[in-house]
Each structure stands twice: as C-alpha cells, then as structure tokens.
Amino acid sequence: MYVPTKCSLARPRIPDRSRILSKASRVIVTRAETLKPLPPTDDLVFGRHSTDHMMVASFHPKTGWSAPEIKPYGPLSLDPACSCFQYCTSVFEGMKAFAGPDGKPRLFRPNRNMERMTRSAARVALPAFNSDALLELIRLLVMIDSRWVPQAPGCSLYIRPTLIGTRPSLGVAPSDEAMLYVILSPTGPYFRTGSKPVRLLAVGEQVRSWPGGTAGYKLGINYPACFSPQREAAKKGYQQVLWLLGDGTGDSMGMKVTEAGSMNFFVVVKREDEEGVDVITPPLDGTILPGVTRESCITLLRSHSPVSPLHSLDPHTAIRVFETPFTLGDMYKWSSEDRLLEAFGAGTAAVISGVGVVGLDGHPDIEIPEYEGALGPVGKALYDRITDIQEGKVEFGDWSYPCA
Ligand SMILES: *Cc1c(COP(=O)(O)O)cnc(C)c1O
C-alpha cells in the first residue's frame, strides 16, 4: 500500500547532491498480516518485546535516501563487512510515547532527540538526514502501532531510532552507506527493584568519557566499555556505576563525578547559610551526554517560585541550580556535614531514579537520607511534574507532542 505523505528524508539545503532525495516523498506502508498478542502489563521488562512494525530507510551515495518503509518487524540482512560491525558506526536515540488523557499517544520534546541524533550522526561521519521527516515517520509508526502504547500508569512505548553505517568494505573510512531504522518496545517502570533507591559504586579506574571523546553524543561505542565494570559492581551488590573522571593522579577523592550508569547525575545540597538548597549537576563539557531529562529538570527547577511552585515542594524553598563540576571528595564532605540531602539519576528510561548509597572500594559507603518512595522532595517534584507533562495532564510550553 502506498501512502503519500509530505515525508522526505532529503535535507534540501545541503549542497552535496548525493544527500538530496526525491523518491522518499512517499512512505511505503506494508501492514503485518498477523498481529502479535500484547504482553501482560507486569511483563513489560525494558526492551524485551518488539511491536508489529518498524520503519526502515537506507542511504546510498549514488541514489541518496530510499523511500522510507514501514513494514512488519523482522531481521535485517546486512553484509558481514558492514562498517557498523567492524568500526561501530552506530548512533541511536531513546524516546517514549505515552498515553494521554484521551488514550492517544504523545511524545515528549521529540525535537530535542532529533537534534541530538543529527549531531551524533555528524560526529561519526554518517550521512545527514532530514530530522523533521524522521520525526514525522516516528509519529506515523507510533500511530500504526498505537495499540502497543500501554495505558497503565508508569508504562510507555519506548522508541529506538537507530542509524548504522552499512558500507560493505573493510577499509577504515567513513561509511558512505547507511541504514536508518526505528523500532518500538512497550515498557514498564525501568527499575525492577520497585521503589527502592539505587546503590551506586563509584568507579574511576575505567572511565566512560574523556575530554574530546564521544560521550557527548549518543553513540553505540560509548556503552560496551561500561559493561564489565557494571557487572563487577553488580557482584558487589551495586546496581549501577557512578562514573568518575580523574586528572591522572589516581586520587579518587579528586575525581570529577560524571554520570550514573547511563543517566545524568544530580545532587541536592543544603546551603551553608541554611536558606534553601543547591541542585548541582556536571556541566556539558563534552564528557556528559546532554540529556533531554537533564535539561528538563534544570528548566523546571529554575521555574520553581512562590508563584508557580513545583508541587510537593515548599513554594518558599529557594532552589539554585548549578551546572558545575564536583568531585567524589565533595560528596564525602557534604555527606559528613549532613548536607547531602538527595542524589538522583535522570534519563528517559527511568525519568528520575533516587540514589540511596554511593560506595567506593576501600572506603565507607556514602549514605543518602532515605525517603518514602525512594525519591526526596526535589526528585519527587521533578518526577511528578515531568510525568504529568509526558502524560498530557499538565501543559508546559510545547514539551508534550500529540501524535494524532
Ligand atoms: C540517553 C542517556 C542519558 C539520558 O538522556 P535523556 O535524553 O534524558 O534520555 C544520559 N546519559 C547517557 C550516557 C545516555 O546514554
């Protein structure tokens, strides 16, 4: 079935003619003949289930982008010499569709993901694509698979746009062929431990990012180096790693705190003058992934005031937000002064994930105060406000994007 739409993966303003696409002015939709049964809500483990359909388009330097196809979910057929297998040219995004009050799917700030994916593709020299067209295709795919958007609270449809290099040659060179695809997976709450706060193990021997590296982009290569430290941390009873970045002297206390697992990291510190709190997260210096959730937290916290307070927070609590480096030593110091009130991770998968303990080999654990439901007042206020916006219960600018 041919469904003409306004979609085009072309980027008309790019002068390189190979990037101009004419055929993709239509999207080819082939519906699955049999639809899969929906998994029960309590089996919505992150990333386990795939939906009925996926979107695929491919790029060839001679012909540009192919007409995008929405077709039944299934395996891809790729040459074993493809760039993505050999040299890891793999870019991805993580976003979610939520059921709104009318039951219809909504996305959360999807333009931020499209902008980030464009930057990530450029960092590994993959072909450019028209991100407005990609967003339009995502919207269409979500509508076609809309019965997979879970209606239960805390559940959503995870969206994984992916761009891979498919140049079928072993030469170490940019991949001038590529495949862009989008798959979907219904998901429940990210952390299976229920509402218990997360235990983090601080790791500085292996690092996930360094100045001038790629950690500021959502690239597949950033993750595999984290897997063995994560497995070691799990053996010691910690669910995630708190990634540190040292100055080469090996002094763990002087190491900068970067991210927690694959989430941005925030601490809430009581001010020395006792009036209000400082919320601190590391700056976007290239070693930190610029998270959409991170940015949303900062904006919402800065909007907290007696006139428009974040609910569950005292309207008169003065909150200052800092994007500034801090070290593990700072965290030990704040904790010893009873000023470390909260720590949490922020990311699309879990939204806000409360941290209860930060451990370091050979040192006592940092214990963060315990709160009912695992989130302290600042974390809870952010979680509630972000999920209310995502589910279309509260308006905030253009952050909620209805698919239909
Ligand atoms: C995706 C990701 C985040 C969170 O980004 P969001 O846009 O908020 O989902 C944080 N850190 C890393 C390393 C990530 O990959």
Image: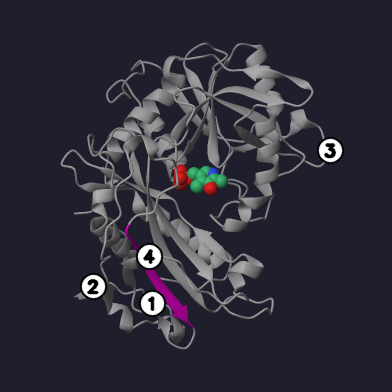
Check if residue 56 falls in the magenta segment: yes
For the C terminus, which image quadrant? bottom left
CA gap between label 2 and label 1 equals: 17 Å
Looking at numbered disc 2 in the image, what kind of residue is underneath it?
A: Lys
Question: Residue 303: image x %, image y %?
Answer: 35, 31
Q: Are marks 4 and 3 in contact (CB under 8 Å)?
A: no
Residue 13 image label: 1
What residue did someone put label 2 on? 6
| Cα–Cα span, label 4 and label 1 | 13 Å
Q: Are marks 2 and 4 in contact (CB under 8 Å)?
A: no
Q: Amino acid at mark 1?
A: Arg
The correct choice, above or below, for 293 with respect to 370 in the image is below
Above-or-below relation of 335 to 220: above
Closer mark to the observer between disc 3 and disc 1: 3
Q: Is residue 185 above or below residue 189?
A: below
Residue where numbered disc 3 is placed: 249
Q: Which stretch appears magenta? A: 52-60
